[in-house]
Amino acid sequence: PNDIAVRAAHTIPRERFNIHQPTSKTYMYLISSNCVRPVLGRQCCWHIKDALDVGKMRQFAEGLVGVSADYSSFACARTLSEKRNRRCTIHSLNIEEHMPAHEEQAFLRDHASLYLKQRNVIKVVVRADRFLHHMMRILVSTLVEIGRGRLDAEVVQRSLASRERLKVDTAPAHGLTLVCAKYDVLLTTSSQLGSTTL
């Protein structure tokens, strides 16, 4: 496919590798928080017209890092209907704001109407030992609702504890990117087990 580029290739013994069992995965989700719909890059981000309180989003995110928990609240209906392990550990959860470059701000100030106020592009990056189906997208949607002020963090924590599905929409898929999946595999003839990112 045109949206995939091969950077390196290794020969790995079949019995030492299971594509479905990485030691960790990292996902990135892009949100365009702007009253104007983005044109460039619109296929790679979720457009939110509302301003988001990133401080509240980060405060909630901090409570998830390093905790092994049952994430049924962030799972899709298909996962909830299956008898499977739903415990995950989030190793890191970073929320970054990216303001327009100085030249772009000057352009908007000089050429756009006053209502064309440029807001942030928000990047959510999560690394965990495993993810449930749709877990990342439901997590992002939850963060957005907290940032909008429509959802209280304490309500989410109670939902996590009770393992009840959160009543939030699933964020659209086009904002999501799999950054990397890490596996413990043998890449050389050495007898030592090496760790690689694929």
Image (spheres, helix red, strand yellow):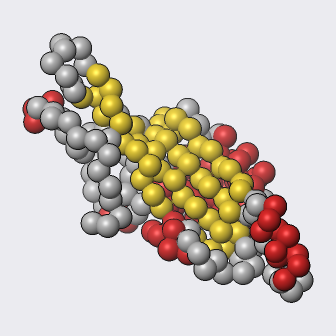
The residue positioned 65% from the left and 40% from the top of the image is: 63
Eyeballing the image, is 118 above or below 115?
Answer: above
Which quadrant is the N terminus positioned in? bottom left
Point 71% across, 77% down: residue:
49
Residue 9, given in percent of the width and then of the height, sits at 23, 41
Q: Nearer the viewer, residue 71 or 144?
A: 144
Picture layout, residue 159 above or below residue 193? below
Is residue 59 rendered to the left or right of residue 193? right
Q: Residue at x 84, y 83 (%)?
A: 111
Residue at image point 35% right, 36% down: 197
Image coordinates of residue 165 in percent, x first then y, are 49, 61
Q: How many marks?
A: 0
Left or right position of 106 against 83: right
Q: Residue 175 vs residue 147: left or right?
A: left
Give the image location of residue 182, x and y in percent.
36, 36
Q: Quadrant of residue 18?
A: top left
- Does residue 90 appear in the picture of this structure? yes
